[in-house]
Amino acid sequence: MRVLYLTDNSSVHNRRFLEKLVFAGCQVWFWNLTTTQAPEAEFPGAVQVVTSTKSVVPGASPGQYRALLPQLQSVLEELQPALVHAGPIQSGGYLAALANFHPMLLMSWGSDLLVESRRNSEWRQATEFALLKADAFFCDCDTVRKRADSFRVFSDSQVVQFPWGLKQGAFSPIGPLPAGDRFTRRAGTTTFIYTRSYDPLYGTDILLDAFAKAHRANRSLRLLLLGSGSQSQGIRSYVQAHDLNDAVFMMGSQPAEELPMWFRAADAYVSCARSDGTSISLLEAMATGLPVVVTDIPSNREWVAEPDNGWLAPPGSAEGVADRMLRVARLAPQDRKAISECNQRVVAERADWDKNFTRLLGMYERLVGCSAGFELSL
C-alpha cells in the first residue's frame, strides 16, 4: 500500500510509526512540512522523503500551511497514494483536508485538540474543517476522542484508538544502570525522574516548587531531570537560588535507547503536565515498575488509580504534588512491590505497541477497501 505520511516534525514518535509501516509492507513517503531540508534523523531505508519547497516554521498558524497546498496537490498527482495519514490536526491534517484527498486518516497528537484547538477562531475553524474532511480518526485516549466529538462525532468504525505504547520488554526493572560517573542512586534517598520537555505546558515551574517544598520536609529526596526546552536556564537559576544543587540533577535530553537505564536509576516518576493525551513517558515509567505522581487530568486518570499504582495531584498545585512525593518516599517495601507489579501488568496488557499497531493497519485496509496483504503478526 502506498502511503503519504504528512506531519510537522521528525520526532521519535514519527520514526516509530514509519518503522512499523515499512515492516508491514507499506510503501511510505514521509513529509515534514516544517523544513526544506532532508531530515537529520535516521529513518528506515525504505521510507522516501518529500521536502517542502517553502518554509513553514514549527508552530505556524494553520493559514500558513496553505502556501504548501500547490505542492501537495502536485505530490498527490505524482505519487497516487492509496491513503494519506496526516497530523497534527492544524498542520498536516489541515493541509490534507484543504487538498480534499480521500481516504485521509487524521491523527491527533493530543495537544492539538486539547490545547491548540482552543487558541483562537482560526485554530478552532481549522480543527473543525480537518475533522469534517477526515475519513477516519486516530487518537491515543478517551480524553482526546471526546474532545474530537465536540467538533464532529465519529462512529466507532471510523476511529482507531490505542496508546502510542511500548515494545514489550523495552522498559523493565531489570537491566543496566547509568555509569557511576554519570549518576548513582545513593542508599537512603528517593529519586524522582522527570523526562518531559522544559515547557510551560508540562508545568516545570510547578514541579520545581513542589520539589523544593517536599525537599524541605524530607532532605533525602532527589530529582533527576532528563529533558530540554525553553525553560532550561530558568530551571538552573531556580536550582541555584533555592540551594538545590546537591538534590537536583540536570542531565539534559538522553538518546531514546538509553532511557530505560535512567528510569531504572529512579525510585519514582513525576509529571506536572497541564494537559496531555496518553503520556509515553508515563507508560515508560510504569513499565519500569515505578510509582508515579502525575496531575489529576482525564488522560492520566485512564492509567492511574490511586493508591493502587500512583497518585494524582491537583493541576497547578505545588502543594499537592509535594504531598504526593512525600507519600512515595514513605512507601513500605511491600507496597512499593505491589505498585511495581501493578504498573508492569497494566502496561503489558494495554500498551503493547506491536499488538496495538495491528489496529492501525486494519483501519488502513478498511479505508482503502481491499486487503493490502499486511503482515499483522508484528
Image: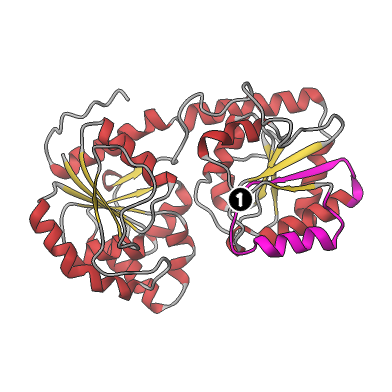
Name the residue nearer the viewer: 254 or 84: 254
Q: Is residue 307 visible?
A: yes
Tell me the SS state at disc 1. Answer: loop
Q: Which residues are magenta?
A: 216-245
Which part of the image, by quadrant, shows the C terminus? top left
Q: Position of residue 44 (x, y in %)?
A: 31, 37
Going 26% across and 65% down the picture, which residue do you hit?
A: 95
Is residue 53 located in the magenta-colored stretch of the structure? Answer: no
Going 30% across and 62% down the picture, which residue do you hit?
A: 36
Q: Position of residue 279 (x, y in %)?
A: 53, 46
Q: Quadrant of residue 185?
A: top right
Q: Position of residue 25 (x, y in %)?
A: 21, 32
Q: Amino acid at mark 1?
A: Gly
Q: Is residue 316 visible?
A: no
Image vertical order of residue 222 relative to residue 10, above or below: above
Q: Is residue 340 left or right of residue 106?
A: right
Please give the residue where the numbered disc 1 appears in the rendered image. Answer: 227
In the picture as drawn, the residue positioned furthest to the bottom comes out as: 121
Q: Position of residue 82 (x, y in %)?
A: 13, 46
> Badge 1 local density, few (<14 within 10 Å), some, or many (20+)?
some
Q: Quadrant of residue 352?
A: top left
